[in-house]
Amino acid sequence: MENYNDIKILGDGVIPEGIYNNIRIAGACNIVGKIDANLLKISGSCNSNENIKSEEIKVYGAFSSKGEVFCNNRFIVNGEASILKGDFNGLVKVRGELNIKEYSSFENIEVYGELKTLGNFEGNSFYGYGRVDIEGLLSADKVEIIIHDNSEIKEIGGENISIKNNTSKKLFGILFNQTKKGYVRCNLIEGDNIYLENTICDIIRGENITIGKGCTIGTIEYSNNLTVDKESIVRNEVCTKN
């Protein structure tokens, strides 16, 4: 998009509908139509009522969109972002706070801050180290969560699912006499290979399931292998082998 105009907002400004190269916002800005850009960088505040498409989006300030956000490369959130829904084809990295209202899709996402979605969230690879609240289904080929804070995910589905305690947090707690543990709360977890720690879940279905320490599970349905740590509680175990 080197033939399109660059825009830089330093104070208050308005960006009309159009196709742009690089958009940099350091003040307060309203986008009043659909835009297509190579880069959207927000260091101040930006509000949009329409769909936004950009190869790369970087949020260091505050970003709010009532339309769908299409990002083909990288969507980086170091500040706060609230969007209607998203179609993320590259890497999403959340170090701040990202709120999504409707069903969204992603290729790869890494959450170190806070993620909240009201709809289903579907993609390839999900890595969660921060706080995650998903009121729908989290579906990915690979789901890896390192427990850093309490998280709630209605349903998790995938090929390989891993939820583990934060070992660095344990060391920090020993050194500074802080032993608070986080957990992940789910209604349903379903996958091929599942490993869980500090997880509270009503139903788990899978082929190979390992329940580590600190779990409270209602029912487990497994078709191959099941291992349960003695410090966890499983009320019902159902083997579905033929």
Image (cartoon, rainbow, N blue to C red):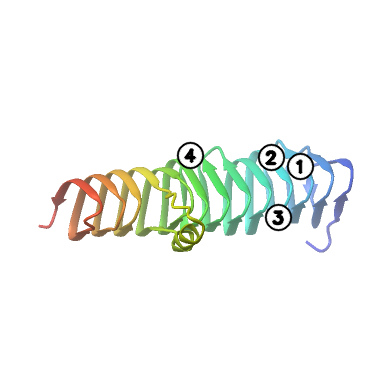
Spatial distance from mark 1 to mark 3, Cα to Cα?
12 Å
**Element on which disc 4 rests:** loop
Q: Quadrant of residue 32?
A: top right
Q: Give the left or right position of residue 223, taking residue 200 as reference.
A: left
| Residue neighbourhood size for the residue with mark 1, other residues' Cα within 10 Å, grouped as few (<14), some (14–19), many (≥20) | many
Front in this rendered view, residue 214 or 68: 214
* Residue 12 in which image quadrant: top right
Quadrant (top left, top right, bottom left, bottom right) of the C terminus? bottom left
Marks 4 and 2, the one that precedes in the sequence: 2
Whether residues under marks 4 and 2 lie with C-beta atoms below 8 angstroms apart, the answer is no
Looking at the rendered structure, the kind of residue marked 3 is: Lys
Residue 162 location, quadrant: bottom left
Report x, y in % for residue 88: 58, 54
| Cα–Cα span, label 4 and label 2 | 17 Å
Left or right of 224: which side holds 151?
Answer: right
Q: Are marks 2 and 1 in contact (CB under 8 Å)?
A: yes
Find out whether the residues at labels 1 and 3 contact each other: C-beta distance under 8 Å.
no
Q: Residue furthest left?
A: 242
Q: CA distance from mark 3 to mark 2?
A: 13 Å
Q: CA distance from mark 2 to mark 1?
A: 6 Å
Residue named by callout 2: 64
Q: Position of residue 129 (x, y in %)?
A: 50, 56
Residue 239 shows which numbered tag?
none
Q: Disc 1 on helix, strand or loop?
A: strand
Residue 153 shown left or right of residue 52 in the figure: left
Q: Which residue is tagged 1?
A: 46
* Tag of residue 119: 4
**Element type at mark 2:** strand
Residue 161 image offset from top left, x and y in percent:
36, 58
